[in-house]
Structures are given as C-alpha cells and as structure tokens.
Image (cartoon, helix red, strand yellow):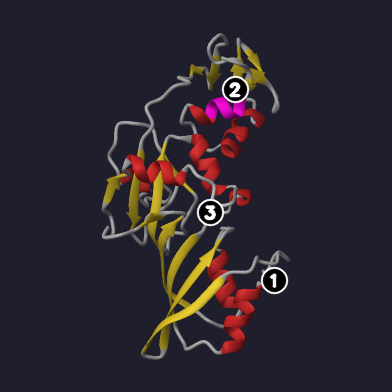
Amino acid sequence: MAEERVQKILANAGLGSRRFCEKYIEAGRVTVNGQVIKLGAKADPAKDQIKLDGKEINPLPDYVYIALYKPRGILSSTKTEHGRKSVLDIVPVPERVFPVGRLDIESEGLMLLTNDGELANLLTHPRYGHEKEYKILIARHPDEDQLAAWRRGVVLEDGYRSQPAFVQIDKLQGKGAWLKVVMKEGRKRQIRETAAQLGLPIVKLIRIRIGSLKLGGLRPGQFRPLTPAEVRQLQRPEIE
C-alpha cells in the first residue's frame, strides 16, 4: 500500500470527513510511529503505526451507511449539549459513525450517518456538486421579487453572497406557503438567514434529499440502512 496523506487515512478509518480529520492533526493529536505530525504528512497504513489520542487506528473498517429522519430538537452532531440528545443517541449501532453535513436543531429531515470518510468528503465538498433539497414552510406568501432574489443569491450577514438556488412555490397554506429549495452549498443556518433577509420567516424546514438519496417514507426518528445501489449512486460525483 502506497503512502497517503494522513488525514485521508484517518477519514478512511471512519474518524470523520477528510477536512474534519485535518483538525485532529492541527491539534497535535495524531502520531505516526510515535512522532506528532503536522498537516501534509504522509504515511503507509500497511507499515506505519498511526495513533489518534494514543490509540492505534484501524485503517480498514467495515463501512456503515444509515439514512435517518432527524427530528426537530435533536442535535446533528456527535456530542450532546445542555442535556439535548444528538443523532447518535437515537441510532443505536455498534459501529462508530458520524453525521454527514448538518441540520440545525430547529430543522428536521434527512441525514446520512456513516463511517466512510471518503464518501463524507464527496458529499460535503462544494466542487462535487451534490444537491440538497428542502421543503420549507414560510409564514407569509412570497412575492416574485423575494423569490427572484433568493434564486440569484443573497448577501448574508457575514458578507458572503449565497450561490444561485432553485426556489419555487410548492403550494400555499393559509397565510403561508410551502417552498421547494434546491441548492449545492450548505453554510451554517444559510437557509434561515437567507429567508430572514428577504422577510420570509421560516415555520418549518425539512431536508428531503441529499444528492441521489431521498428521505422517502421515513418518519421523524426512524432510520434504515442504505442499499448497495444507493451507496454506489452517492459515490458518483454529480459533476464529472
């Protein structure tokens, strides 16, 4: 086996996405053959002893892929905070898995849990073009100017301009409306901040698709393993 960057080896061992594993290295928590390494270091997992926090990693895990309907009020992280449950508390699997991407605590819908760091990198890195689709209930009827601005991109509070998105009215509901939103980026609380900037308060936000993977008939708190065909489809970049 040839030498590879250590963050890629850690990701392949199911310890998080490649970018997340870079943080372990930057924090000085990773050693190769007893020596603390810096970001950019390479190793051969077949020959070198690689440890995280003093524990040797297994570079060849059995991969697990789970689709979960994250309920509202559950953290999309690996740790609990202030007594709140995380997605790992409601998915009792023996393997060490982690969530791919995020949904804020008020949002709900599809999440992927896995120990496949390479797939996590593929699904979260913007250059691969994987879409995320959402159903969003807003508190008032949007006008065409608001929808057009959302489609073009909106300057957020930190100065970042969001990328163009697909936005359309799915159906009106009383004084509000259900929107369909499809986007290829996923900055923290981006949808909520975008809607607030446009004067469209969000009542409910549900993610129904990540790339080719759909929420389907899952109900809040339910989960299921992915089929081999679903995994193969996710492993294909949407932009070749």
Q: CA distance from mark 2 to mark 1?
A: 38 Å
Overall secondary structure of the magenta section? helix
The circle drawn on residue 155 is 1
Q: For the view shown, which residue lies furthest in the right direction?
A: 159
Quadrant holding the N terminus: top right
Of tags 2 and 1, the one toward the viewer is 1
Residue, disc 2 = 30
Q: Which residues are magenta?
A: 5-10
Q: What mark, if any, has residue 130 been given in the picture? A: 3
Q: Which image quarter: residue 157? A: bottom right
Q: Amino acid at mark 2?
A: Val
Residue found 45% across the figure and 46% down from its top: 234
Residue 185 counted in the magenta span: no
> Which callout, 2 or 1, points at the residue further toward the start of the chain?
2
Q: Residue flagged by tag 3: what amino acid is it?
A: His
Q: Is residue 25 visible?
A: yes
**Disc 3 versus disc 1: distance between alpha carbons?**
22 Å
**Residue under the point 53% across and 22% down:** 53
